Image (cartoon, helix red, strand yellow):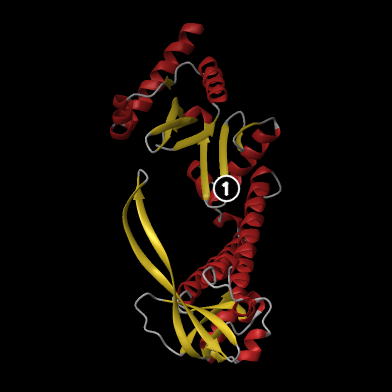
Amino acid sequence: MWHGFIGQRIAATNRTLHRSGMALLVAALALGAFGTRTFINVKQGPAHLDEAQLAAINDPSLQFRNFITVEGRNTISTGITTIEKSTRNGVVESQRTTAEYMAMVVGKHILVVKVKPTDIIRQKYTGTITSLPDDLKKEVFSGLADPDLQAATLHVLLDTTAGYGDELMLMYIVVGALVLSGLWMFFLSRSRNEMPERHPLCKALSQYGPLYSVVPQIDSDVAAGTSSFNSVTFSRNWIISCWLTQVVVMRRDEIIWAYKKRTKHSVNFIPTGSSYSLVLRDARGKLLELNNSEQLVDSYLAGLAEQTPWLIFGYDRKLEKLYKKQLQSFAQTVSDRKATMQAAKS
């Protein structure tokens, strides 16, 4: 029973579910590996680096122990600050100082330290070691002509403004969520492989009768020929949309209302265009919305109107209210229209 179209759709969604679970676990592993350095640095505490160790650092991004404490002497303020400005229509409304830069002597070298503007001058700082931007180095020594001072300046910057490891808790939550989601997808795909009846597609089909009769009926119908619209399968008697846990199944003879939906888009109240979708509603209260170009939506509606002219076409708020509150009456009206039109033909 599971070797036809329905079985293939179930197997395809299970494979997608399995691959999605694998992708989430790989993402969790990558994120966990990315945070390993931070975790170990927080666990072991800041490393104490001396002048020789600081001078030996070529690329701070490759420094495993990047959470460090440095002790020096003769710390002074460079007078350079980082200012954050808030503007509106090109006019500065407010500004605040977010950081200040200090110069601290470490042995025979100078270390630039980024501190909070409220921090006092110290001879010992703890923070994250990063690269010293060239433009900042030039600004620090812009008023000094002594080349020896510039040559003595270390190529690294000690940033003490951010709490080291503050992002770990958020990372733990994200990694945990990724792992749980990945495992859930693994177990779900395995369960559905072992018992296809648990798949949402089977649950949707069971509304139309026993699976042992509905599934072969659809397989036979699909084998006779299908068309597709946005990856949704249209056979002679059925419409089937199946993607992971999102499933919609309709009998074509139960569709009672069809219309085009237009959605206008804008950015900052400036129109950027419109998108279109085909909306189908059946006598069971189900809704299927398929996005596509306006031309394809109009083409499908025109074909549907030619094949089944008794349906209700076009959107109206009164129709929406009637469909939601008096579905049976709505469906009966369409059934009566169908009987009248078929009787007129004969």
Q: Residue 213, position in %: x, y?
A: 59, 43
Single out the residue that lies furthest toward the front: 145
At a point 52% along the width and 29% down the height, the residue shown is 252
At a point 52% along the width and 71% down the height, the residue shown is 140
Residue at which label 1 appears: 243
Query: In front: 158, or 101?
Result: 101
The answer to whether residue 212 is above or below residue 126 is above
Q: From this viewpoint, is residue 185 visible?
A: yes
Is 127 on the left or on the right of 193, as rendered? Answer: left
Is 170 on the left or on the right of 229, as rendered? Answer: left
At a point 51% along the width and 70% down the height, the residue shown is 143
Q: Residue 16, position in %: x, y?
A: 64, 55
The answer to whether residue 194 is above or below residue 37 is above
Tally the numbered discs.
1
Residue flagged by tag 1: what amino acid is it?
Trp
Q: What is the quadrant of residue 196 in the picture?
A: bottom right
Q: Residues within 10 Å of mark 1 (few under 14, many from 20)?
A: some
Query: In front: 233, or 5?
Result: 233
Query: In front: 233, or 159?
Result: 159
